Image (tube, rainbow, N blue to C red):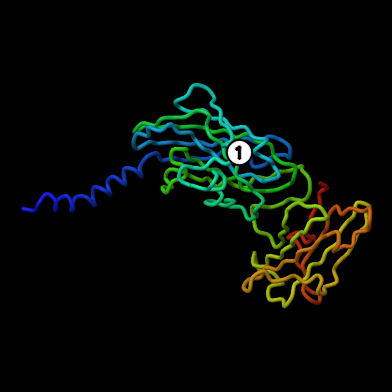
Amino acid sequence: MKSNSTLSREWLPGNIIVVILGLLVMTCVYIDGVDYASSVKAGETITFTAHTRFEAAEDRNNPSRVVFAFLAPKSWNAAQNTTATYTSNIDVGVQTMSLVPAGTVPKNRPGETWTGAIRALYGVGGNVLDDLEWIAFWSDKTYTVRNADKLTADIVISTVAGPYNLRFKPTFFLNYTDDGIGSNTDHYKVYNGTCLEVTDGQGDIIDFCELQFNSAQPLTSTMNDFVTYSFQGDVEENDLIGAESIYFCATAYTSGGEAIVRCSLDESSRMKKVFQFGNTYSITIWPASYFNVPEGEELVGLEYSFKNEDGSIEVKDKSGNPYRYTFYCQ
């Protein structure tokens, strides 16, 4: 017969596994879908309704808040222009949510804020440009979860679309404070939405949804900011693939109606290859200096394309028109 100490040693590892699994299977969360319109006019309110579920596999004795975050363009100033509420199967009436206080740290992400941790995990979702931010809310009410509890909640985000014409993919995140973005992804979820378009606003459409041959950073600027224009030649087949050099050909327009052309195809307009491999090229300019803007004039925008060394090959947008960039006074 084996001694009790031997039996204990053999039983202990399996017991630890059971205990660990019990700790991991706590409250699973789900985002079953998010309803919203496919377009909105600049300056108007748009509503996102997220259908969420929480299913507990064991008692959670610590009171916990629901945490819900969404991704929006920085130009929306969504933290100042958004309200969040929800209705659930265990509450009476509409419940309120508030912005997670700045600097609040999730339980399992020491040194990170809620929005910083969500961005570290999911970036800008399915978008291809970076000028987006996460805005996080939590329920004003706390909940103590018991085994087999099932909470359903329709979370309603109402926010004001910003001033610029653009397209982006809204993205949503769900968790609760007692988990605090832990190690088990069953306890938090992300939902990637389809493309939403803002119309009737300022400037040309900024497309966060799909890669284009052209890219400009920052997305909005004045003529006195440095701006980087890029040719992303690997997006799809094009005649500039294999070109020895690629040049930035541009015409800037002033507030007084003057057109200033810079299409010399020389060293000053030659774009630099961003990586050793691939076909992405960029040029960074200070527009006021690059176009030698006359004193007293302001640049309101520019049109540009990409050319090879002798100008025989030119890439424009899919309609055959130059790409456009609008300058904004600040």
Q: Name the residue: 83% across, 54% down.
A: 301
| Along the viewing direction, whichever of 276 and 23 lies nearer the viewer | 23
Q: Position of residue 54 (x, y in %)?
A: 43, 36
| Along the viewing direction, whichever of 197 and 84 lies nearer the viewer | 84
Q: Is residue 285 left or right of residue 142?
A: right
Task: Specify the quadrant of the image occupied by residue 37.
Answer: top right
Label 1: which residue? 36
Residue furthest top in the image: 92
Element at badge 1?
loop
Q: Is residue 166 left or right of residue 26?
A: right
Name above or below for residue 228 compared with residue 45. Answer: below
Name above or below for residue 277 compared with residue 217. Answer: below
Q: Amino acid at mark 1?
A: Tyr
Q: Position of residue 318 (x, y in %)?
A: 73, 60
Say how many tags the image has. 1
Q: Name the residue: 77% across, 59% down.
A: 226
Q: Position of residue 70 (x, y in %)?
A: 58, 42
Q: Position of residue 234 (x, y in %)?
A: 64, 67
Task: Specify the quadrant of the image occupied by residue 218.
Answer: bottom right
| Along the viewing direction, whichever of 185 and 14 lies nearer the viewer | 14
| Along the viewing direction, whichever of 35 and 138 lies nearer the viewer | 138
**Crowding near pointer 1: few (<14 within 10 Å), some, many (20+)?**
some
Q: Is residue 250 left or right of residue 95?
A: right
Q: Is residue 113 left or right of residue 198?
A: left
